[in-house]
Image (tube, grey):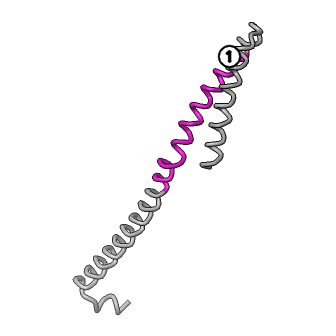
């Protein structure tokens, strides 16, 4: 306890200021590192995953269109409509191959 009495208040305040400054520098450095890591994750999402999600959304529309075309082709029993369905199915397979390749 005598050690604290011998120190001046000014010296103790200076040490507190230094500790606070060091803590702020460490906090700021950690935030910069975390920000850079998050930026790389967001760039990966923007460059890779977002286009895949857009393509998957387009594929859902193709699947719905394929379902409707199948229904019409079965009801009407026309060979030309069945060939149209096969063309859409080929487009869908190609789209799935592109998604599989990029993943």
Question: Residue 16, how many percent across, how many down?
Answer: 31, 78
Viewer-closest of 36 and 57: 57
Q: Main secondary structure of the magenta part?
A: helix
Which one is nearer the viewer's eye here, 25 or 16? 25
Is residue 94 depicted above or below 76 in this figure? below
* Residue 71, picture quadrant: top right
Q: Is residue 13 left or right of residue 32?
A: left
Magenta segment range? 41-70
Considering depth in this image, is 84 or 3 the residue closer to the camera?
Answer: 84
Residue 3 in the image: above or below residue 85: below
Q: Is residue 57 magenta?
A: yes
- 10 Å crowding of disc 1: few (<14), some (14-19), many (20+): few
Q: Quadrant of residue 11?
A: bottom left
* Of the pair 3 and 70, the residue shown nearer to us: 70
In the picture shown, does residue 90 fall above or below 4? above
Horizontal side of residue 8 vs 90, given as left or right: left
- Residue drawn at (24%, 87%) of the image: 8
Q: Is residue 56 magenta?
A: yes
Q: Label 1, secondary structure: give it.
A: helix
- In the rendered view, does 85 fall on the left or right side of 8? right
At 64% across and 21% down in the image, what residue appears? 65
Residue at mark 1: 68
């Amino acid at each position: 306890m005598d050690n604290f009495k011998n120190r001046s208040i000014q010296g103790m305040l200076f040490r507190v200021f230094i500790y606070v400054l060091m803590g702020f520098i460490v906090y700021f450095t950690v935030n910069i590192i975390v920000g850079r890591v998050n930026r790389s994750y967001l760039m990966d999402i923007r460059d890779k995953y977002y286009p895949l999600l857009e393509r998957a959304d387009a594929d859902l529309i193709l699947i719905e269109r394929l379902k409707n075309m199948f229904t019409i082709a079965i009801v009407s029993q026309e060979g030309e409509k069945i060939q149209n369905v096969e063309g859409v199915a080929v487009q869908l397979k190609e789209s799935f191959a592109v998604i599989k390749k990029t993943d």
